[in-house]
Amino acid sequence: LTPKGLQIVDEMAGPIRKLENKRVEIIGHTDNSGSRLANLALSANRAEAVKAALVDKGIPAKSLITLGAGSQRPIASNDTAAGRARNRRIEFRIRNADNNDDAE
């Protein structure tokens, strides 16, 4: 993780720690550079790195789910360097632990 990424993990650890009966999905994303399979693996590795950092901060591993979405859900154009950088990201989603329904 980059220094900025580690800072975000530090900021997220406190609120995640306070969630009760919730699980947190960590979803990794990539830009569209490279093959589909390589991007799926990279996005999954990105999510796993964030999970490991959160576990190091005391978050129980069983409350964290990782997913790799690859380049399938861009939030910016992949036609520019700035857009590709925005697409290389992590999303967090909160779910109820008992029934896996998404909660906002």
Image (cartoon, helix red, strand yellow):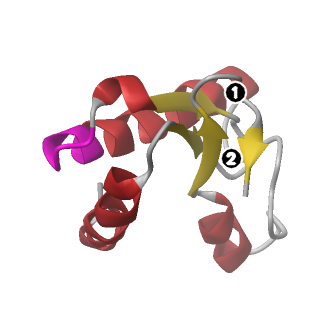
- Position of the N terminus by quadrant: bottom left
Residue located at (17% from left, 44% from top): 58
Depth check, mark 1 against mark 2: the one in front is 1
Q: Is residue 24 above or below residue 87?
A: above
Pointer 1 or 2: first along the chain = 2
How far apart in space, not on screen, are marks 1 and 2 (Cα)?
Answer: 32 Å
Query: Residue at label 2?
Result: 33
Query: Helix, strand, or loop for circle 1?
Result: loop
Direction from residue 69 to residue 12 in the image, left or right = left
Residue 51: image location, x then y, percent: 35, 38
Q: For numbered disc 2, what is the local secondary structure? A: loop
Closer to the camera in the image, 100 or 61: 100
Say left or right for 79 vs 35: right
Tell which of 61 and 75 is nearer to you. 61
Q: In this rendering, does residue 77 appear at all? A: yes
Judge whether 43 appears above or below 94 on screen. Answer: above
Look at 57% across and 28% down and name the residue there. 97
Mark 2 residue type: Ser
Determine whether, in the image, residue 6 is placed left or right of residue 18. left
Q: Quadrant of residue 4?
A: bottom left
In depth, the one of 40 and 102 nearer the eye is 102
Q: Is disc 1 in contact with disc 2, using a CB cutoff of under 8 Å?
A: no
Chain part drawn in magenta: 53-59
Which residue lies at the image location 52% right of the left edge and 34% below the top edge?
Answer: 42
Residue identified by numbered label 1: 100
Q: Position of residue 6 (x, y in %)?
A: 26, 63
Please provide percent x and percent y for residue 63: 41, 31
Is residue 100 shown above or below 2?
A: above
